Image (cartoon, rainbow, N blue to C red):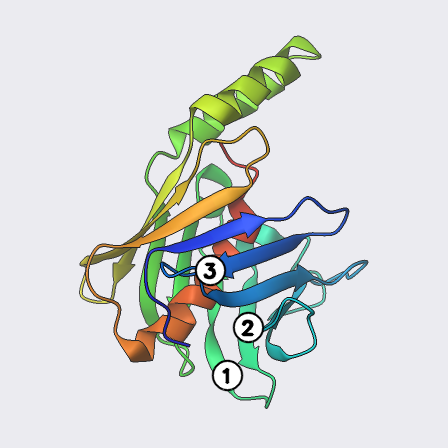
Amino acid sequence: MNPAFPLTLEFKFSLLTELRVTDANGTLIGIVKEKFFSIRDEVRVYADEARQVQTHAIRAQGLMAGALDWRARRLIRRTDGSEVGALQAQGLRTLWGASYELLGPDGHPEFTIRDDHPWMSVVEGVIGAVPFVGDLIAVGFDYLVNPTYTVTDAAGQPALRVRKRRSFFSRRFVVEELRPVRPEEAELVTLGLVQLVLRERERG
């Protein structure tokens, strides 16, 4: 997996969560589907539109990891069972704003992901708490204010940025390079940011 950046991650209109990932050339990178009625968050990644060729599976570690999202670790594996890495939520920080680590197959942090403007989630939560009127205002807030997330590598250098595109339904995100992504990083980064978008699409 070595896509040409920027990547576009777009949610399909569907009763089930389904995400389509394409690269800068419009090439399909993967179709992502969340497993329905699962206690633990579980995601399957397919290489084709027909969802016949599965390439990866992503699963929250621990029985209640999907419910306790702020402390979950989501393991990324290829279909042959080999590990790509994991997305690790950084405890209570994630309740304030997105705060994650991308771990390599050896369990060591390779990237850190931060919400650039965590205060926006607090403002949105306050607005949404107002019955009826708050819901209407929150829809407008979702359209006008869109979050960004910066991915920093182990050397502390910004590597990528994730932007939510303006939409009433939080449907499209774009992943841009801030420095060239090396081929050995591409698989972990792509699948880790798929998980980020699945977890964070309701913010902003």
Closer to us: 145 or 9: 9
Which residue type carries mark 2? Leu
Q: CA distance from mark 1 to mark 3?
A: 23 Å
Q: Earlier in the sequence, mark 1 or mark 3?
A: 3
Residue 116, placed above or below residue 11: above
Which residue type carries mark 1? Glu
The secondary structure type at the circle numbered 3 is strand
Q: Earlier in the sequence, mark 2 or mark 1?
A: 2
Closer to us: 67 or 115: 115
Image coordinates of residue 149 in percent, x first then y, are: 36, 46
Which label belongs to residue 75?
Answer: 2
Determine which residue is flagged by label 3: 22
Near mark 1 (Cα within 10 A), the count class, few <14, some 14-19 or many ≥20, is: some
Image coordinates of residue 43 in percent, x first then y, are: 64, 65
Q: CA distance from mark 2 to mark 1?
A: 8 Å
State yes or no: discs 2 and 1 in contact (Cβ < 8 Å).
yes
Residue 89, placed above or below residue 117: below
